[in-house]
Amino acid sequence: MEKFVPQEISQNYLGKISSIVEYYKLKIKEGFGDLSESDFQKVLDYEFDSFSKNIDFLETFDPKNELDRIRNIPKNERKDFIEKYKVKLRQQRIGLAKCRRFIERSIEFNNEIPRDDLDSIFTKFKDKFGFCGNQEEIIKSLLDNFYLQRQIVIEAREKWSDNLELIRNLTQVDFNKSDLKSLDVSVGPMSIDIKTNGFNCGRIYEHAEEPSVKFKYGGFAAQSSHEVPIYYTVIKNDLLFRMLYDAPGVVTHEHEHEKNKLFEHIFFKKISEQEEQGLWVEYEEEEDIELKKIKLENYIIPQIEYALNRAKDEITAFLTERSPLVLQSDLANFFFKDGYGGAYDYLQFLRDFEPKKDDELYQNTLRELFENKYKKIISNAVESFRLFRKKRKMDSQELIALLTDKSLAEWPKTINRLLEE
């Protein structure tokens, strides 16, 4: 495969996307796994230019150091400094999330992407959003972990070149040669990927050590019991299943997205846990009540953003099968029953954290963010989807493909731009 160089290709040979319409056409193709390498780069360039055109930090912005500086400002003079801090922090947080997603998408598009190319993506974001040393370490660690895990997978494939031997060693299931006709094996970005029938899915699942990711269209991800674990995915691939759901190619490509969720689950979640611990310690140790609330928000907001990503998975799954109007009627039961909580209550662990159940600052801040961020974002996203489907004739799958790489918070703006065309 020709070397994939993010910036040089688009700037020197391909030019830019000329209109929002061209961009959305390419996004739909990307959603269905039908995008060329050159068009994929056009999409990334267009997205980067669009969301960063009015942002330029000019210098490194370290949130922790900035709060330490604000601490030395008299309380009656802090307001403007705190507002500017919150704006920069929000912009930088968006930039860091986008950077992670660009890296993930680039790996998904080309599993063999060289390290230098991913480093160049990070550098591009770092220069624009003023990432500090700690954030640089986080991304570098993420990339180190990816290439380490990919090497482990490649070495496992080389060690057990026979499919039967490989599957037995990964799953501890005693398959025999007659089972091979229903077992298809390939190497993913950082996992061995197994496609098989529902019966074999069940056999492997029973032996799997704490399956980590369950897939929307049938299957799961897990890891081997070796001292250095090898990750693998198992995808249900029954003929009847494909006939019922693969219309046309939707499930096939959805499986590709699902397999790559393993990347996010393992590495992005681990990185988030490192950040989370540091943010919690900063909040706990802060004595200035005004700064303590800010540090508590800094801790809670990433938790809400992670919860919104999980909610997005449920929402998009729902919207592929039912109307947005039906989903709207069930939003409360799903995500915020009685104004707080629901069947998919991804924030309950924060609310019910025993040491803070009677902490007024903690509980009030959490409820405020739940109402003004979590609940509002989910409601507005589903309403924008409903409005678009009412005004325009576009298949739900196509619209979801357009929104695949957009957070729920970005849905209304993206859909409004679509409606303006």
Image (tube, helix red, strand yellow):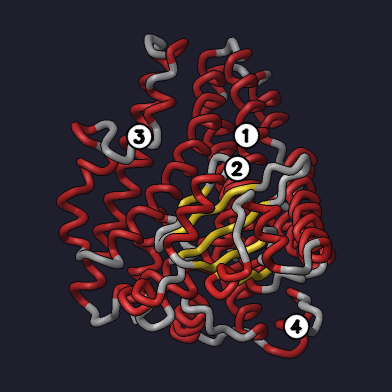
Contact between labelled residues 2 and 3, with CB atoms less than 8 Å apart:
no
User: Which residue is depicted at the point 37% across and 9% down?
Assistant: 358
Q: Could you give the CA–CA distance between mark 4 and mark 1, rounded to whole angstroms?
A: 35 Å
What residue type is disc 2 on? Lys
Does 301 appear above or below 176?
above
* Mark 2 or mark 4: whose residue is earlier in sequence: 4
- Looking at the picture, tell me which residue is in the foreground, 132 or 272: 272
What residue type is disc 1 on? Glu
- Quadrant of the image for the C terminus? bottom left
Q: Could you give the CA–CA distance between mark 3 and mark 2, rounded to whole angstroms?
A: 21 Å
Contact between labelled residues 1 and 3, with CB atoms less than 8 Å apart:
no
Contact between labelled residues 1 and 4, with CB atoms less than 8 Å apart:
no
Secondary element at image label 3 = helix
Secondary element at image label 2 = helix
**Circle nearer the viewer, 3 or 1:** 1
What residue type is disc 3 on? Phe
Residue 139 image point, x, y percent:
74, 49
Q: Quadrant of residue 335?
A: top left
Judge the density around disc 3: few (<14), some (14-19), many (≥20) Cα neighbours within 10 Å.
Answer: many
* Residue tagged 4: 9
Q: Determine which of the numbered discs, if any, sits on residue 370 in the image.
A: 3
* Residue tagged 1: 273
Q: Is residue 276 visible in this depiction of the protein?
A: yes
Q: Could you give the CA–CA distance between mark 3 and mark 1, rounded to whole angstroms?
A: 21 Å
User: Which residue is depicted at the point 49% across and 43% down?
Assistant: 306
**Count of numbered tags:** 4
